[in-house]
């Protein structure tokens, strides 16, 4: 049985990735310090002998805590929502730098493959649309979002350095907007924000005029693309996301239609450096991995709304 190590295993994506790896026959060692991760995301694995968990700040060296052979290291630890990385700027920078080094050092020591979770934020507020992997981006290196953007850009740079100079078998996934169960209700991203407001009968908050565009990928599709990339021989960045684009206002209206609610939309000032357009070109993923998303927005949102309904009911029962 091959072993995979997942940093950020208690997070939204890390926990779903852990499930997929177990389903593929891996033994999984998960690491997290719960700054933004949730132990409940791994609770269903407490009796699974193939899963072990280490509470660890991965910005500190941790290779000596991993025994035995390791086939692949997935570095998914990081604050990922604007609320988180604006409140945790230094933790965000450290997990993109020190923790990436530490994760790569583990892969190097074990002769393991390595995959880092990067982000569409590397493209900044793009001048090219849709965004292809060879676009270098338009990022404000000193703006409030830079702690996340530049941490991820550094993580990509050091990953390629380990590949070129230490011959580590590395992969880089650039993740576009993803949604689904296990997202935190109040993490500030648009999907949980709109769903949470709708389910609590509150106006839906739109920043700016709501004309900025996003595309939304359901979590099972994203994890499938990431797993396929981890098994590939490709080393440069690969976009994984859903290319179906809609405006934020259209997305809010879609939430209201699915929930059957009639609620007002209220406008707030647009945050600094908020991208005006965001949509992946997934030609590379299609060609190299045979991957494209399968879950349509309506189906994915219904699953996600049902999850948040359960979360809110549990909170209200306390």
Image: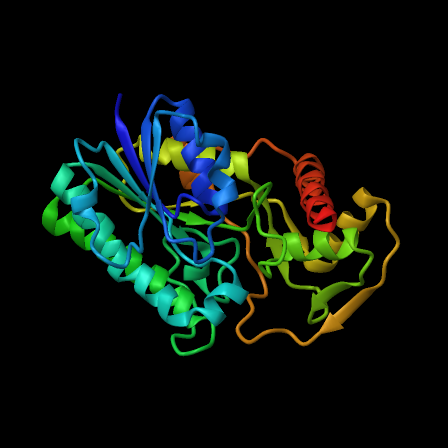
x, y (%) of residue 295? 61, 33
The percent coordinates of residue 263 (x first, y second) are 86, 58
Give how far across and how far down residue 140 sits, in percent: 43, 74
Q: Quadrant of residue 67?
A: top left
On the picture, is 167 further left or further right than 50? left
Vertical side of 290 occupied by 298: above or below: below
The colour style of the image is rainbow
Can the viewer see residue 194? yes
Is 57 situated left or right of 167 in this image?
right
**Which residue is most to the right?**
262
Q: Residue furthest bottom?
A: 142
Q: Nearer the viewer, residue 301 or 23?
A: 23
Q: How many marks?
A: 0
**Residue shown at 32%/60% (left/top)?**
96
**Residue at 34% over, 67% down:** 93
Indicate whether 144 appears above or below 93.
below
Whether residue 286 can be seen here: no
Task: Left or right? Give the position of 146 relative to 168.
Answer: right
Where residue 308 sits in the image (x, y, percent)?
68, 45
Q: Is residue 186 above or below residue 315?
A: below
Residue at horizontal 33 percent and vertical 32 percent from the top: 28
Return the residue found at the far front: 318
Residue 114, quarter of picture: top left
- Image quadrant where one finds the N terminus: top left
């Amino acid at each position: 049985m091959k072993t995979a190590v997942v940093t950020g295993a208690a997070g939204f994506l890390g926990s779903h990735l852990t499930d997929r790896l177990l389903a593929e026959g891996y033994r999984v060692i998960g690491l997290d310090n719960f700054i933004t991760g949730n132990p409940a995301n791994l609770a269903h694995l407490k009796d699974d002998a193939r899963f072990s968990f280490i509470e660890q700040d991965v910005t500190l060296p941790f290779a000596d805590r991993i025994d035995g052979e390791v086939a692949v290291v997935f570095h998914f630890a990081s604050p990922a929502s604007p609320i988180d990385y604006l409140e945790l700027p230094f933790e965000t920078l450290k997990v993109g730098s020190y923790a990436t080094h530490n994760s790569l050092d583990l892969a190097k020591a074990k002769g393991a493959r390595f995959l880092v979770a990067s982000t569409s934020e590397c493209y900044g507020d793009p001048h090219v649309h849709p965004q292809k992997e060879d676009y270098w981006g338009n990022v404000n290196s000193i703006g409030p979002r830079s702690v996340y953007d530049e941490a991820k850009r550094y993580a990509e740079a050091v990953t390629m350095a380990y590949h070129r100079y230490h011959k580590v078998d590395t992969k880089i996934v650039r993740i576009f907007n993803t949604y689904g169960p296990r997202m935190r209700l109040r993490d500030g991203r648009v999907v949980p924000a709109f769903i949470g407001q709708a389910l609590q009968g509150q106006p839906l908050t739109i920043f700016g005029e709501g004309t900025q565009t996003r595309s939304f990928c359901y979590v099972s599709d994203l994890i499938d693309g990431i797993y396929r990339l981890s098994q590939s021989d490709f080393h440069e960045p690969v976009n994984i996301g859903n290319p179906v684009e809609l405006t934020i206002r259209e997305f809010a209206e879609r939430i209201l239609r699915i929930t059957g609610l009639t609620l007002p939309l209220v406008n707030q000032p647009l945050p600094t450096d908020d991208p005006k357009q965001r949509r992946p070109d997934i030609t590379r993923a299609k060609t190299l991995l045979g991957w494209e998303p399968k879950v349509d927005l309506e189906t994915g949102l219904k699953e996600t709304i049902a999850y948040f309904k359960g979360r809110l009911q549990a909170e209200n029962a306390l």
